[in-house]
Each structure stands twice: as C-alpha cells, then as structure tokens.
C-alpha cells in the first residue's frame, strides 16, 4: 500500500505466485491478467474501471487494443516506448527518458517535475501502462513497477533488496539496491532480479559471432575440422551436412565445471534461460554430497538455437562461493528434444552412451528467443538409485511434478522427464 498526502493512496494485490493482479485507488480499480510463464513483458490484459485493454507481444509489447482501436509501440534499444501510433502510423503519444529512467519532455528535453502528469495521461488516467524499459508507471508513488520490486528513477535505485546476490569477484554487484550496477546504457533489469545486457550488446555479439559468413560456414560443415579441435561434432546425415552439432563426452569444458558467473557471461550476448535443480545424496561411505542438474536453452549465436543439460557436483572454492565440478562418474543416460513455438523439431538427440552433459545446437535456426523454445530433458537414474532418491525428495521436484513439469516414465520409475516451456528461468 502507498499513501501520498497530495496524490491519495493506492493498494496493490498479488496472487500466490507473486504476480500483481490488481491495483485499487478510491477513484479506480485496475485488474491485471498476466502470462504466468513469463517473468517480464507478461501483461496480457488490463481492465480499468471495467474497460479492458489487451496487449500483443513479440519480444516486447507490439500493440494495444482499447475501445475498438489499435495502437502500436515504437521502442528504443532498451525496450522503452518512444511513440504510440494509431493504425494510420501517426503518433498519438510520445515519450522520453534519461539514462536512469526519469521522465523527460520529448519536445524540450527537460526533466519533468514529479508532480507533472505524463504526456500519455488523460484526466489523470494512464491510457497505456508502459514506461522506461517496459516498466509500468505508478502515479501515486512515482515509482516504476519492475515485477519483483519497485524502482525509483529519481534516485536510480530500487526501493527493496535484490532477490539475487552479486558476485564476490566483482564488488560492484554486491549493492542490492543499485540499478544495473550503475550502467543503465548497456544493461537492463527486466524483472527486478538481475541485470541483463540490452539488444545493443547482443547485436554486437551477433555481428562478431553470427554474421552471415560464420553462419554459412557452420550450416554447411565447412569448419568441422576446426569444431573437432574444440570438441564439437556435427550430426551428419551420411556425408551430408545438417548444421546440427553436439559436444563430445571428453570435451575441454570438463576441466572448468560451472557456476553462476558463467551464466552471466552467457547472457552478455544472447537470449538464454536457465533451469537449476539442486539435490543431495549420500555416497557409498555414507557421506552427504550436493549435486545439481543444470540446464540451458536459447540462442547460441552461429551454432543456432539449442539447449543443454548437465549433472555437476558441488564444491566450495577458496572464496567460499559455490562452484560445480564435473565428475564423469555421474554420467547417466540422457536425451533432449527441442521444438520451436510452431512445433518444428530443432533437436532430437538420444545418445547411446551415458552423459554428464548433453547438448544440441541447430545452426539452421538463427536468432531464436529462449522463450520460443520448448525443451524436454530426460534422465535415467536406473544405475544410480542413490541420486534418484535424493532428487525426487527435493521440494522443487515435488512441487514441479505436481504442476506437470516433471513426469515419470510409466514403465520405469527411474526415468524422469522435464518439460520446459516459455520465457522463464528456474532457479
């Protein structure tokens, strides 16, 4: 609840999953219908005092329908709206923001006073909800709704602690209130939890790694010898190139393991979602050990759309931070199946031998968004009942099995499959 002596009060209501479902003021009630599979860019409908607005998305919001009229968004590289146009292409509203999201008069370039009503309001009622980087504006508090918490553009800070701690190795990430590590030109925080790089840096990565020449070489197998040197192999159809690649069992990545910092690096230049499932088990000596099943799906630049899943053993590094090492003795039979939102099969891979890390990349599908990839990962614990018991007794597995995201093979209880849809990380 927010109370302002001059602007009145507003009360926000949330569902059990943390999504905002309503906002109530004495003079109006706003109800929200959200896509629960997305952490951000998820507002499907907004009903203001009985009048419904609906929104259509691509990567970001594309259009709004209201009172029988359609409006279209033009955005900058950070995802902030610049113009709202009608069907005739003429702008009906224009917007501007400074580096940290303060509202600017688009005609004068001057910062608007906090008491100044926005150019896209009519009699105090916002006719469209989106502002800086796609956040939703709250007129009473002057804050911007960033899903997990609220953001103050005036101070360039969030008003609540970050859900995600930073990295010890990079002290500037340890401040749990600052916005995008004070680098708002290159970073955006779409859900109020963790910064990601804007489309600017991703375009740079695509220019360097996924330019037309690099993609052509990958698709046609011209660099298979070079890929072999770095432990990738092409899944050929006889002698014919397919553009589909996997990593070898004894790849060089086994010497480095994995941690959260790598995920940050992955997100620098591409669209990626991750899924993490931690669990514990006892070894043959009765000693408890911690493990993780860690998966990814998204755009792998010149390698194309794809995904991965691996099993790792937890260790604590010299700085007291979790790092997950590779133990090839943990290898289990695995399979991955990936389709796009239209049902096109991108990867269907079930190797004959157990894997500690299973991967699949299809260079024929370029610039795919992670949220448009639907992945099914299957793992067979038949040879490791100890790992199976530890895994199925975790709260996350039990909860997600009840949701239908984890399923059990009807003929073998040790074979489990995870279905991963939508644009959502699972931490």
Image (cartoon, rainbow, N blue to C red):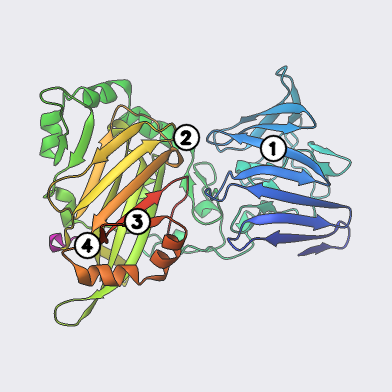
- In this rendering, which labeled residue sits more in front, label 4 or label 1? 4
Query: Real-space Cα distance between discs 4 and 2?
Result: 43 Å
> Residue 352: x and y, percent?
13, 47
| Residues marked 3 and 2 touching at CB (< 8 Å) | no
> Residue 42: x and y, percent?
59, 45
Q: Is residue 57 above or below residue 267?
A: above
Residue at 71% over, 61% down: 13
Is label 3 in a helix, a strand or a loop?
helix
Q: Is residue 166 visible?
A: no
Residue at 76% over, 30% down: 93
Q: Is residue 357 left or right of residue 337?
A: left
Counting residues from the start of the chain, the first of labels 3 and 2 encountered is 2
| Residues marked 4 and 2 touching at CB (< 8 Å) | no
Is label 4 in a helix, a strand or a loop?
loop
- In this rendering, which labeled residue sits more in front, label 1 or label 2? 1
Q: Quadrant of the C terminus?
A: bottom left
Counting residues from the start of the chain, the first of labels 4 and 3 encountered is 3
Q: Is residue 185 left or right of residue 260?
A: right
- In this rendering, which labeled residue sits more in front, label 3 or label 1? 1
Counting residues from the start of the chain, the first of labels 4 and 1 encountered is 1
Q: Which residue is mark 3?
A: 261
Q: Which residue is mark 4?
A: 381
Q: Quadrant of the N terminus?
A: bottom right
Is label 2 in a helix, a strand or a loop?
helix
In the picture, the disc for residue 54 is 1
> Residue 160: x and y, percent?
61, 64
Query: Real-space Cα distance between discs 3 and 2?
Result: 21 Å
Badge 2 crowding class, 10 Å Cα cut-off, few under 14, some 14 to 19, many 20 or more, is some
Q: Which span is picked out in magenta? A: 325-329
On whether residue 131 falls in the magenta region, the answer is no
Badge 3 crowding class, 10 Å Cα cut-off, few under 14, some 14 to 19, many 20 or more, is some
């Amino acid at each position: 609840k927010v109370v302002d002596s001059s602007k009145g009060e507003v009360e926000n209501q949330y569902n059990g999953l943390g999504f905002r479902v309503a906002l109530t003021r004495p003079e109006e009630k706003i109800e929200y219908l959200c896509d629960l599979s997305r952490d951000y860019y998820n507002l499907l409908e907004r009903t203001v005092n009985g009048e419904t607005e609906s929104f259509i998305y691509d990567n970001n919001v594309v259009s709004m329908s209201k009172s029988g009229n359609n409006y279209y968004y033009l955005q900058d590289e950070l995802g902030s709206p610049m113009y709202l146009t009608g069907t005739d292409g003429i702008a009906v509203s224009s917007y501007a923001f400074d580096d940290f999201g303060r509202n600017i008069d688009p005609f004068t370039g001057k910062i608007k006073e906090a008491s100044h009503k926005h150019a896209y309001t009519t009699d105090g009622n916002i006719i469209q909800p989106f502002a800086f980087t796609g956040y939703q504006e709250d007129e009473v508090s002057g804050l911007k709704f960033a899903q997990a918490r609220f953001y103050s553009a005036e101070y360039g800070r969030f008003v609540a602690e970050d859900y995600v701690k930073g990295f010890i190795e990079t002290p500037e990430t340890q401040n749990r209130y600052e916005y995008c590590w004070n680098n708002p030109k290159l970073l955006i925080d779409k859900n109020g939890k963790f910064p990601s790089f804007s489309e600017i840096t991703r375009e740079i990565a695509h220019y360097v790694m996924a330019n037309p020449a690099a993609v052509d070489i990958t698709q046609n197998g011209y660099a298979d010898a070079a890929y072999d040197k770095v432990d990738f192999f092409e899944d050929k159809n006889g002698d014919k190139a397919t553009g589909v690649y996997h990593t070898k069992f004894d790849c060089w990545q086994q010497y480095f393991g994995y941690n959260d910092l790598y995920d940050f690096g992955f997100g620098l230049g591409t669209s990626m979602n991750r899924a993490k499932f931690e669990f514990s088990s006892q070894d043959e000596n009765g000693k408890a050990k911690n493990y993780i099943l860690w998966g990814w799906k998204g755009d792998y630049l010149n390698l194309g759309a794809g995904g991965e899943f691996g099993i790792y053993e937890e260790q604590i590094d010299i700085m007291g931070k979790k790092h997950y090492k590779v133990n090839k003795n943990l290898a289990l039979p695995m399979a991955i199946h990936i389709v796009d939102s239209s049902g096109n099969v991108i990867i269907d891979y079930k190797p004959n031998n157990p894997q500690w890390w299973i991967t699949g990349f299809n260079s024929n599908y370029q610039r795919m968004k992670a949220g448009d990839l639907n992945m099914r990962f299957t793992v067979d614990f038949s040879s490791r009942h100890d790992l199976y018991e530890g895994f199925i007794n975790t709260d996350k597995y039990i909860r997600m099995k009840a949701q239908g995201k984890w399923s059990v093979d009807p003929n073998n209880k040790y074979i489990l499959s995870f279905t991963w849809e939508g644009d959502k990380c699972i931490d």
